[in-house]
Image (tube, rainbow, N blue to C red):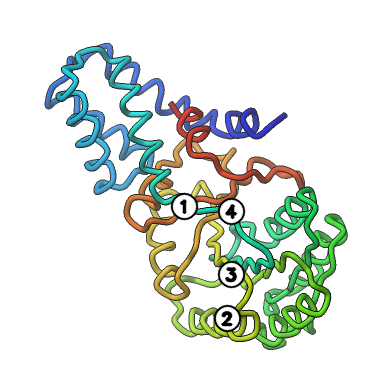
Amino acid sequence: MGIFGKIFGALKKTKANLSEKLRLLFSKNKLGDEFYEELEEILISADVSVTTAEEIVERVKAQAIAEKLKDGDYVTGILKQTLTEMLEESEVEPPSYPCVIMLVGVNGVGKTTTVGKLAHHFLKQGKTVTVAAADTFRAAASEQLSVWAERAKVRIVKHEEGSDPSAVIFDAVSSVKAKNTDVLIIDTAGRLHVKENLMNELRKMDRVVKREFPEADFLKLLVLDATTGQNAVSQARVFDEAVELDGIVLTKLDGTAKGGFVFSLSAELSLPVLFAGVGEKIDDLEYFNSQDFVDGIL
């Protein structure tokens, strides 16, 4: 199954949630203020923020009025176009090499699993990969990452439990530079976005990579559980303020009936989703495609 099929399969719940509500809206309301108010409510119910939902509806309404549209199917087309353009506005170019990817996020979102999936993804592209176990606090975190590294058949750099995470990153960068490795993927400890001391530790790791490997394309990606909903945007905002995020990796996309916060990330924070986890297997991680995502939910 290709990305198109996987994304569509993962978004079944979201599509069922939105499509039925839109069908009912078009069947009972003619285009007008009441229609657009209810369209805004439907978007908010899918975890689009109020601010972003208002912007989407304004764009749709303006185009519908300009083109004198009265048919629901045409308005659905405009909605799809508007949502796709909103995501595309924050899209970025694929990484260049050498590349360092540091995954950050709260506890339990699937960072370590995502490291393994990303390693496999880049290996399939013919790249050499090393992973760094910079989560030195969670019991058995490095062992869990070792399992994924072995499964993906990539090298791992790790220290003893309780070590300084920045020291792990220093050694990993040194190793990658010495071996001319294409991609370094860094696993970090889960941290509450409200704990300033933990965010300061992330800033230190960020500085180590920039100082020791300035020639690398350095991406800081926030791993978000797609079932989190609107809280995802506030999480992203705090992590972005701490380390200037480059994008998002969505996990558990197949487990949510919502997912509208993706549009809020793009519209309010200019953060693109780069990868999406669409299952449990090592190859169930795909490049995020804006058009596929919108087609999958509407």
Q: Secondary structure at mark 2?
A: helix
State how many labels appear. 4
Q: CA distance from mark 3 to mark 1?
A: 15 Å
Disc 3 marks a residue whose amino acid type is: Phe
Q: Secondary structure at mark 4?
A: loop
Which tag, 4 or 3, sits closer to the chain's start?
A: 4
- What residue is shown at x 72% (from left), y 29% (from top)? 1
Quadrant placement of the C terminus: top left
Q: Which mark is residue 218?
A: 3
Q: Tell me the residue that label 2 is attached to.
A: 210
CA distance separating discs 3 and 2: 8 Å
For disc 2, the neighbor class at 10 Å (few under 14, some 14 to 19, many from 20) is some
- Counting from the top left corner in percent of width and height, residue 166 is at 65, 85
Whichever of callouts 1 and 2 sits on the residue coming sooner in the sequence is 2
Please, what is the three-letter code of the amino acid marked with disc 4? Pro
Q: Is residue 231 left or right of residue 202?
A: left
Q: Position of residue 234 (x, y in %)?
A: 38, 61
Return the residue nearer the eye: 226 or 285: 285
Q: Label 4, label 3: how many angstroms apart (C-alpha)?
A: 12 Å
* Residue 23 in which image quadrant: top left
Tell which tag, 1 or 4, sits nearer the viewer: 4
Q: Is residue 120 depicted above or below 222 in this figure?
A: above
User: Dot 4 corresponds to which residue?
Assistant: 94
Please tell me whether mark 1 sits on a helix, a strand or a loop: loop
Q: Which mark is residue 272?
A: 1
CB contact under 8 Å: marks 3 and 2: yes
**Residue furthest toward the left?**
33
Distance CA(mark 1)–CA(mark 2)? 22 Å
Q: What amino acid type should be assigned to the residue bearing mark 2?
A: Lys
